């Protein structure tokens, strides 16, 4: 890079909220190192892809994108692969995409400034690939938050659960938590910057263990919710094994904690859960659901489900369908099982055909849609609070989200201009499987 030449970068993010927030921290780090973010690959000197490897197609997308932009290498552009695919594939990325100059796993982001110096010095192969035993977390005050009102705080990184289908323990390292003091300090800074909605993140967020020993996860959750100026606190994703009754008690006790719990079950069959190494039974999961349903508040429940796991019989699948009816989730993220590198499920017998997986997924989605439609009817004629997120001009509707994390589209008088990030009361007039519709209560 010539002296005095502007250092520009473009970043594209694949995957989950953790990746989105990691990119915010990466962007902040690059800005602090004198780089400028641009909106197209054509403008950028450094092109970065923050990757996800949870699903096979997600990894394929990255390599397709790298192939598409290989021609830009002749213009002197440099390429970097970050995140889970970077950690999973390591140096193989250089072989598969020789125009890539930097490969950095998520556990190595704290080393980015040093890696950028190497890249600027002309090094063609710069790597950051910590193993899963690192004790370091990626904490930075340079986070470039993409939303001015809702923001993330990662409180725990990595995973020690080793579900037999999942690559996360291998790509993100062992569980390592931040101190409660550092989390609360970041939350207070965010409030000072105007944030009112904070979401605590972790691969298993409720597996949090305060290194200082001062607070449990539930106590930290409550403490964040009690900071003056905060209106909403969310958390994701919870692991059922570490979901404790005091989390529900905290939601009941602290009004700013949102009345929504995302508790991935993955299967309704104890036999399949055991093969998945999920560390709980159907009965133990339902016990946790009973705690949530016994709360004083109306807590919305959502989940994750996988169909077609090796050895899943029709009877096992029917147990999952029955679980939907018993729990009555408001929504579910559903997936077909896909084999992932390094996972124990690769060696399991009785693979399910793609045709059967697709059939089961369609049945599951239809059943959940029926339940979601019925569940959302309970909000009809209710007046609920929504955080205003934007306006759909073509439909002449505003849109926002409720405390239960439900999308709410609503109308308001034409002469009334609402502020993004403000909170309004809306009367619900219609309900659908994935959203509510209403009108501003004035």
Image (tube, rainbow, N blue to C red):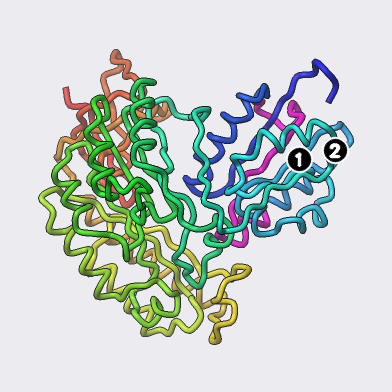
What residue is at 66 percent from the left and 43 percent from the top? 49
* Magenta region includes residue 42: yes
Which secondary structure lies at badge 1? strand
Which secondary structure lies at badge 2? helix
Q: Nearer the viewer, residue 247 or 310?
A: 247
Per the image, the residue denoted by label 1 is: 79
Q: Earlier in the sequence, mark 1 or mark 2?
A: 2
Residue 163 versus residue 293 in the image, above or below:
below
Q: Quadrant of the C terminus?
A: top left
Which range is magenta? 37-61
Crowding at dot 1, Cα within 10 Å, few <14 / some 14-19 / many 20+, comes out as: many
What residue is at 27 percent from the left and 23 percent from the top? 412
Q: Residue furthest front?
A: 212
Q: Position of residue 315 (x, y in %)?
A: 36, 85
The Cα atoms of the two marked residues, 1 and 2, are separated by 8 Å
Q: Position of residue 128 (x, y in %)?
A: 68, 47
Q: Position of residue 176 (x, y in %)?
A: 45, 52
Q: Quadrant of the N terminus?
A: top right
Q: How many marks on residues?
A: 2
Q: Residue furthest left?
A: 296
- Marks 1,2: beta carbons within 8 A: yes
Per the image, the residue denoted by label 2 is: 73
Q: Position of residue 150 (x, y in %)?
A: 38, 32
Q: Nearer the viewer, residue 186 or 271?
A: 186
What residue is at 41 percent from the left and 58 percent from the top? 333
Q: Residue furthest top?
A: 415
Residue 115 versus residue 235 in the image, above or below:
above
């Amino acid at each position: 890079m010539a002296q005095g030449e502007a250092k520009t970068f473009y970043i594209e993010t694949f995957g989950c909220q953790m990746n989105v927030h990691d990119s915010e921290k990466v962007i902040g780090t690059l800005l602090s190192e004198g780089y400028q973010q641009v909106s197209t690959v054509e403008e950028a000197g450094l092109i970065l892809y923050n990757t996800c490897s949870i699903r096979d197609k997600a990894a394929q997308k990255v390599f397709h994108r790298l192939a598409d932009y290989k021609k830009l290498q002749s213009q002197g552009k440099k390429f970097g692969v970050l995140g889970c695919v970077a950690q999973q594939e390591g140096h193989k990325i250089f072989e598969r995409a020789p125009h890539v100059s930097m490969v950095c796993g998520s556990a190595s982001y704290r080393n980015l400034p040093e890696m950028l110096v190497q890249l600027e010095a002309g090094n063609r192969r710069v790597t950051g690939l910590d193993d899963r035993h690192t004790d370091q977390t990626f904490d930075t005050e340079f986070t470039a938050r993409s939303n001015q009102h809702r923001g993330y705080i990662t409180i725990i990184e990595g995973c020690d659960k080793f579900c037999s289908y999942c690559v996360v323990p291998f790509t993100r390292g062992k569980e390592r938590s931040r101190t409660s003091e550092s989390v609360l300090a970041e939350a207070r800074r965010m409030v000072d910057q105007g944030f009112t909605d904070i979401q605590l993140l972790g691969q298993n967020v409720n597996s949090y263990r305060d290194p200082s020993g001062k607070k449990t996860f539930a106590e930290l959750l409550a403490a964040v919710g009690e900071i003056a100026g905060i209106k909403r606190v969310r958390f994701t994703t919870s692991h059922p094994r570490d979901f404790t009754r005091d989390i529900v008690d905290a939601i009941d006790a602290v009004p700013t904690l949102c009345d929504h719990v995302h508790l991935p079950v993955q299967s309704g069959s104890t036999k399949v859960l055991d093969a998945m190494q999920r560390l709980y039974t159907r009965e133990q999961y339902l016990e946790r659901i009973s705690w949530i349903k016994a709360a004083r508040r109306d807590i919305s429940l959502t989940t994750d489900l996988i169909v077609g796991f090796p050895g899943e019989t029709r009877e096992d699948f029917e147990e999952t369908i029955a679980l939907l009816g018993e729990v009555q989730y408001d929504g579910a993220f559903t997936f077909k099982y896909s084999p992932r590198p390094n996972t124990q499920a690769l060696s399991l017998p009785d693979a399910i055909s793609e045709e059967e997986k697709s059939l089961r997924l369609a049945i599951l989605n239809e059943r959940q849609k029926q339940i979601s439609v019925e569940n959302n009817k309970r909000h009809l004629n209710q007046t609920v609070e929504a955080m205003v997120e934007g306006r759909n001009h073509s439909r002449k509707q505003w849109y926002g989200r409720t405390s239960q994390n439900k999308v709410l589209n609503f109308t308001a008088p034409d002469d009334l201009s609402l502020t993004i990030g403000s909170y309004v009361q809306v009367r619900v007039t219609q309900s659908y499987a994935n959203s509510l519709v209403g009108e501003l209560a004035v």
